[in-house]
Image (cartoon, rainbow, N blue to C red):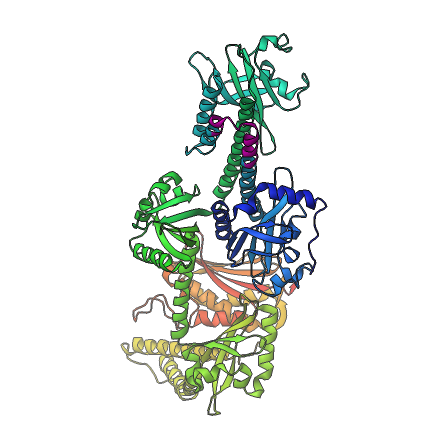
């Protein structure tokens, strides 16, 4: 711990402290208001106005501590007064000066300290305004500025006390016999007028009447412009409030120039015509015969002058008591201006806060007021700070009817227990729309039984609305999670331990939720699937997702069941990585697959063979193998042959589809010219197109392109698309085939001029057994498997197939394949 050094001017500093009389006066309610406000604004448990005495620091005002003083050698404020800048210790355990300080290692366990020196008018640091917290924290520049302004308010009170003390001492020494002067100064200084304009005008009126002058005013000087800011005058004076003059046309310029050797910035002239400067002031702004003028300072710089003028010459000089009165009055004007400017700055600073700083008072009779509130209260409750100070009931009228009872109850509870008040409620705006408001305040009981809260109100509508929407969304997601028919799991990425799981995940496993949550996915996975699991983890690390893939899980009884998994990797707010997985029990699907395989085998072996015989027999009959048949029998035989052919095509499509989906259809890939494949497919469809009286159009020559494909399978795809285009084309229509190469792919387009695909059916085009017209009386025959087979073949060739409505009407199917060789 580092003991704070004493300033080099410690003796003078101690004398200055004694001269303030702060310690002799004891606790002062004015300073308590500031420390309570500091606690509320900065949300800290402790705020102090600390006075650094010879061997101790004594608390002029203390919020949050039971003690009234501590030794100086362990004080933080002893360090703070050694500099003019704020002392901010964000974490005492990281500062060698305080890490082992008893106030840090023991009660009150200080972890954060911010103190601003309080300086007398003579420039001596006598103490600090400081805030303390029991946990580390940082202040933004804006918060530091607010703390400095609050300290300046304390400093203003100290300066006012100094000025008043000095004024009192000066009056006692110089005006023992001038009780009227003292009474007048007291009347001016402690008047109850509510605005600065009224206070100053009232003071000027009393002073002018006391000095028997014709006009009294307070001027403001900006460069060479002399403005009459506040004024009181007799009937015959033509000057007016707000008038402006050139500084050089006034007697006051003497105060700010070297024309006269003035010891202080003041003028007392009984007869202006006898003054040496009279001849130089050729064009005075007013023909005064007697002049008094004293410089006024505010915030350390010249503001203007306090001046009195008379239209007649004074017979007797200004007395010492009059001069003393004017000097003391000028100091009161300076101090009041200084305080007003600082308060105005603090008010403007508060106006930049996102919420309302307030004091709320509950009287014993049950009435309420806001003794103090920042300007934002008007946008919050629709009443000005002045109106709020008179009556708080209009504010309560704006609170939502469903919240008002809770608000009143929370206020009564806080008043009875003196616990901090905190609430979230809705308030209506001018358009009668309700917005969410958050409030917090610290109460204190006053001598008359009233309770006064110091607090902060903030509009949190966007935050609260978002929070409630998020809660609603989370509830919906939790419902989906809990009632999803597919298992959902949450695992820790590092350990694999299950963090959460729904009922669909637990049910097939045989475990209870508590038992399941104690496992990791390694405990449920047979050893033979370890390579797949490790591959999934690699995929999560590289792409952020895995699957889908199939494996087995081990039940509680040791048996296994098949599952299909896929998932993604996400990061929690605390930085932990977790895996969200969909885990589907596919036991029923495997059972269906076995049934399907049996069905396919039956179709292949038990149905295909007799169907081939039936089709052959029908062909022989129609060809005349058994002689001529009755004329009526031929249409029936032809219809039977066509239906047998359609049934054979359906069986072939079914077998092809199952081979493709199961990955059992081998693709013999080789590089070959695209043009030859297209010509072959078109030639195969020539007779079919002539039968439907539809032509197939192609360019004079194909682009010289080669692709790596299974030729017969690509021709199967092309003939399938061409047959569909021909079937749906009008009579004498044309089907157009074209090829468009690009840098990355080759596009093969087949376009017809038929009716096109209905918009509501387009999303089902490539599904199995999907047909736009599925009725028994449809005009165009088909199995509904052709496009599904087409898509599967193209996917296995590494390409894509798509549909779009052709420009000008009709349909266009196009295939995208990768370049292999660009001749």
On the image, the x and y values in percent for residue 60 come to 54, 49
Residue 180 belongs to the span the image colors magenta: yes
Q: Nearer the viewer, residue 494 or 423?
A: 423
Residue 564 belongs to the span the image colors magenta: no
On the image, the x and y values in percent for residue 786 come to 44, 71
> Image point 50% across, 83% down: which residue?
518
Whether residue 802 appears in this view of the structure is yes
**Taking 442 as reference, is 334 above or below it?**
above
**Taking 580 as reference, is 445 above or below it?**
above
Whether residue 600 appears in this view of the structure is no
- In the rendered image, the quadrant that contains the C terminus is bottom right
Overall secondary structure of the magenta section: helix
**Taking 731 as reference, is 30 above or below it?**
above
Q: Nearer the viewer, residue 170 or 504?
A: 170
The magenta segment: 165-182
Quadrant in which residue 626 is drawn = bottom left
> Which residue occupies the extreme left position in the image?
632
């Amino acid at each position: 711990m580092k003991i704070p050094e004493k300033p080099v001017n410690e003796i003078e500093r101690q004398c200055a402290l004694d001269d303030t009389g702060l310690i002799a006066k004891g606790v002062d309610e004015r300073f308590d208001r500031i420390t309570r406000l500091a606690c509320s604004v900065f949300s800290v448990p402790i705020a102090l106005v600390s006075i650094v005495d010879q061997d101790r620091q004594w608390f002029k005002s203390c919020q949050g501590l039971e003690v009234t003083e501590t030794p100086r050698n362990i004080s933080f404020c002893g360090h703070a007064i050694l500099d003019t800048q704020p002392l901010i210790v964000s974490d005492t355990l990281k500062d060698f000066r305080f890490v082992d300080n008893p106030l840090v290692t023991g009660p009150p366990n200080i972890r954060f300290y911010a103190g601003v020196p309080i300086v007398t008018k003579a420039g001596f640091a006598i103490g600090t305004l400081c805030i303390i917290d029991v946990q580390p924290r940082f202040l933004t520049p804006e918060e530091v500025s607010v703390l400095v302004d609050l300290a300046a308010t304390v400093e203003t009170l100290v300066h006012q006390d100094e000025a008043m003390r000095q004024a009192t001492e000066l009056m006692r020494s110089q005006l023992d016999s001038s009780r009227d002067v003292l009474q007048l100064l007291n009347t001016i200084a402690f008047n109850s007028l509510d605005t600065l304009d009224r206070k100053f005008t009232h003071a000027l009126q009393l002073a002018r009447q006391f000095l028997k002058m014709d006009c009294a005013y307070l001027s403001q000087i900006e460069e060479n412009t002399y403005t009459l800011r506040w004024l009181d005058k007799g009937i015959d004076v033509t000057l007016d409030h707000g008038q402006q003059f050139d500084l050089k046309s006034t007697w006051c310029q003497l105060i700010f120039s070297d024309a006269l050797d003035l010891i202080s910035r003041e003028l007392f002239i009984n007869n202006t015509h006898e003054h040496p400067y009279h001849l130089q002031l050729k064009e005075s702004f007013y023909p005064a015969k007697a002049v008094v003028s004293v410089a006024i300072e505010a915030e350390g710089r010249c503001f203007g002058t306090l001046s009195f003028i008379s239209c007649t010459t004074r017979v007797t000089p200004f007395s010492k008591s009059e001069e003393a009165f004017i000097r003391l009055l000028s100091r009161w004007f300076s101090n009041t201006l200084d305080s007003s400017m600082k308060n105005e700055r603090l008010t403007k600073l508060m106006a930049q806060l996102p919420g309302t700083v307030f004091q709320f008072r509950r009287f014993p009779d049950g009435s309420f007021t806001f003794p103090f509130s920042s300007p934002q209260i008007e946008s919050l409750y629709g009443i000005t700070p002045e109106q709020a100070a008179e009556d708080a009931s209009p504010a309560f009228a704006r609170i939502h009817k469903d919240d008002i009872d809770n608000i009143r109850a929370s206020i009564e509870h806080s008043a009875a227990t003196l616990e901090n008040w905190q609430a979230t409620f809705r308030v209506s705006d001018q358009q009668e729309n309700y917005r969410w408001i958050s409030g917090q305040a610290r109460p204190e009981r006053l001598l008359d039984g009233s309770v006064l809260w110091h607090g902060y109100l903030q509009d949190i509508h966007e935050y609260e609305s978002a929070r409630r929407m998020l809660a609603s969304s989370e509830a919906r997601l939790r419902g989906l999670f809990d009632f999803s028919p597919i298992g959902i799991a949450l695992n820790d990425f590092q350990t694999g331990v299950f963090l959460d799981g729904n009922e669909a995940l637990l049910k097939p496993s045989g475990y209870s939720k508590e038992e399941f949550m104690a496992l990791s996915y390694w405990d449920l996975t047979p050893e033979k699937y370890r390579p797949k699991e490790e591959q999934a983890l690699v995929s999560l690390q590289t792409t952020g997702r895995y699957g889908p893939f199939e494996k087995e899980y081990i039940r509680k009884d040791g048996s296994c069941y098949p599952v299909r998994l896929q998932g993604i990797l996400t990061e929690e707010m605390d930085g932990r990585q977790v895996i969200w997985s969909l885990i589907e029990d596919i036991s029923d699907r495997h059972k269906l697959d076995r049934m399907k395989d049996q069905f396919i085998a039956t179709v292949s072996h038990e149905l295909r063979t007799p169907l081939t015989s039936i089709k052959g027999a029908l062909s022989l009959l129609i060809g005349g193998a058994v002689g001529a048949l009755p004329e009526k029998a031929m249409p029936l035989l032809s219809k039977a042959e066509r239906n047998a052919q359609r049934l054979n095509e359906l069986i072939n499509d079914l077998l092809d589809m199952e081979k493709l989906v199961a990955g059992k259809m081998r693709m013999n890939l080789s590089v070959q010219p695209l043009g030859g494949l297209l010509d072959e497919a078109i030639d195969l469809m020539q007779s079919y197109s002539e039968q439907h009286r539809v032509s197939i159009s192609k360019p004079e020559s194909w682009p010289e392109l080669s692709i790596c494909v299974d030729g017969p399978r690509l021709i199967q795809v092309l003939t399938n698309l061409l047959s569909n285009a021909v079937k749906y084309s009008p009579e004498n229509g044309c089907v157009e085939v074209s090829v468009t190469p690009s840098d990355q792919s080759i596009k093969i387009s087949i376009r017809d001029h038929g009716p096109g695909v209905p918009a509501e059916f387009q999303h089902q085009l490539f599904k199995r057994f999907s047909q736009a017209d599925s009725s028994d009386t449809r005009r165009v025959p088909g199995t509904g498997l052709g496009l599904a087979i087409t898509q599967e073949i193209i996917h296995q060739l590494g390409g894509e197939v798509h549909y779009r409505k052709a420009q000008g009407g009709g349909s266009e199917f196009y295939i995208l394949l990768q370049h292999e060789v660009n001749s």
